[in-house]
Image (tube, helix red, strand yellow):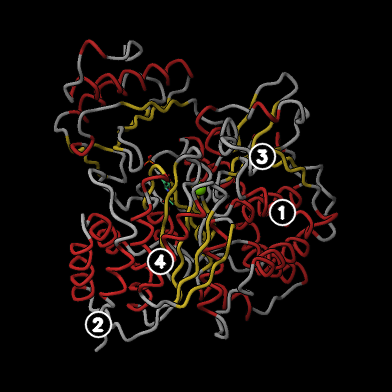
Amino acid sequence: MAALPVDAISELSNLHPKPEHIHFQYGTAGFRTLGSTLDSVLFRVGILAALRSKKLDGKVIGVMVTASHNPEPDNGVKLVDPRGEMLENSWEAHATHVAAAPTTAALIESLSHLVKHAKIDLSKPARVVYARDTRPSGASLVKALEDGLKAMGAETRDAGVTTTPILHYLVRCMNTKGTKEEYGDDSEEGYMAKLSGAFKKLVTGKSALPPLIIDCANGVGALAATVLASHLGETLHIITLNDSTTTPGALNNACGADYVKTTQRLPPSLASYIQPGQRACSLDGDADRLMYYYADERGVFHMLDGDKIAALVAAFIVELVKGAGLEGEINVGVVQTAYANGASTKYLSERLPVKCVPTGVKHLHHAAEHYDVGVYFEANGHGTVLFSPETQERLSSHSPQTPAQSTAINHLLNLISLINQTVGDALSDMLLVETVLAHKSYTAVEWDSLYADMPNRLVKVVVKDRNIFKTEDAERRLVSPVGLQGKIDELVRRYEGGRSFVRPSGTEDVVRVYAEAVVKTQADELAFRVAGLVYDETGGDPAKRPKEFI
Ligand code: 16G
Ligand code: MG
């Protein structure tokens, strides 16, 4: 049995020492923190990726270097499993353990333990594909990653500067090449051709929509959106804004999907371009989240978030399934989190099954796999649609009884090509939305009127130790600290249409409070009152108690 290449690892590990006093943790979004501190982490992730590949018999593993919607000095890295999905849960702990080893000797020990514990056959090949976003720290972090891969003798492919969803796509393509599950050509060109080809077929015969503005967050999405626009040509007129990928500090600054969602505002840079009623959308820094919006005649901003996208898309797919004569045979379901607007949950539940799961893509993705067609979206704009292998098979082999059924089936088959099923993908989701708008002849205003959002408020509370907050029922209820949920319930009862929940953030050292009520001022008040309860309960300094916590 082959052994760990201890000499090569040691030699290269000494070039990438772990900084003292930093605790790295593989969280919901991989490792993510200040880019300047991540060198040792990247080196070790290279080794981990190779080991994960060996563990899976040489299947290609992906590594993406990005910090998504975070500001430019941050960076991060995450591993992608062979079907293009998130890293398996149990390996998150392995990754944290390996990243924590204080010295080269401790690293070797941690790796040896992993090899033994996970029963990794080191004689298997290791194959890894990696990419990065446009952050300035990306290039040197990739060098550290390459050292880790080199130490393990992995076979590698550098996918360069590209979006997170394209990297996920490449992983799936490379692993399915030549099989009956072949996902597409394993190149960025293949991705563009697949998406744009499917889109063109889907909108054939429909009237062209007015131009769409894309806010690219000054990130890697700008590069991909530009290529996509040239593939789409006349079919969709795209105007790309915020595409300054080399201007220092511009990335995600007062633009991008997260800015729009959290501030509930138009990026100021779009103000002079957008016409009343014109739809626009924002990507985040690695182009896996999407927010649509428009400003009305009075200049009032209206957000079309992940919930609105889910409502639009799920209703459309249900209609196509009916049109295909497959109602009752193919079940469409939706997956959301507690952050989904109550009005969206109501709208969707009246039409199809809806499941609520804890925050984080991996939870949504896995729950969506239980449906024949699973539509999942987080309110923040991350989501996709999964078609089970049986459903894909059934659609390809179904014999339609009428021309109308045949058309509906073709649309569904083209949607399967249009949608990036590996992970949420802003550009693919954008084409999906545009497809539905073209089919329904909806303007942004009409889409928005599917349901009216409940007013809501999200508040952060800085606490001494967020780990004491434990939740149940898909994060909708607190079990710890004991007694706090009862107090929240009592408050919520006093507000018409009130709903509120508290959960520890998985990405920041804070506790998040969400509240909804029929009237906006009441939603704000409820959120601040619950935040006050959380603050007091956890022994926050009364002198520093934020004054809005009523
Ligand atoms: C990460 C998650 C996202 C989630 C967010 C919640 C992935 C790839 N991303 O960005 O799904 O909504 O964290 O952040 O899983 P929070 O725990 O800080 O509220
Ligand atoms: Mg992102």
Instruction: Give the residue at x 38% y 53%.
Output: 39
**In the foreground, 217 or 10:** 10
- Percent x, y for residue 8? 31, 73
Residue designated by label 2: 3
- Amino acid type indicated by mark 1: Thr
Q: Residues within 10 Å of mark 4 (few under 14, many from 20)?
A: many
Q: Which element is circle 2 on?
A: loop
Report which residue position mark 4 lands on: 147
CB of mark 4 near ligand 1 (< 8 Å): no
The reply to whether dot 4 and dot 3 touch (C-beta < 8 Å) is no
From the viewer's perspective, is residue 274 above or below residue 344? above
N-terminal-most mark, 2 or 1:
2
Residue at (67, 70) in percent of width and height: 190
Closer-to-camera residue (268/22): 22
Give the vertical position of 337 relative to 84 (above or below): above
Q: Nearer the viewer, mark 3 or mark 2?
A: 2
Above or below 367: residue 486? above
SS class of the residue under badge 3? strand
Residue linked to disc 1: 435
- Residue 198 or residue 8, whichever sits in front: 8
Indicate the position of residue 411 as horizontal and vertical percent values.
70, 65
**Label 3, on which residue?**
215
Identify the secondary structure beneath mark 1. Answer: helix
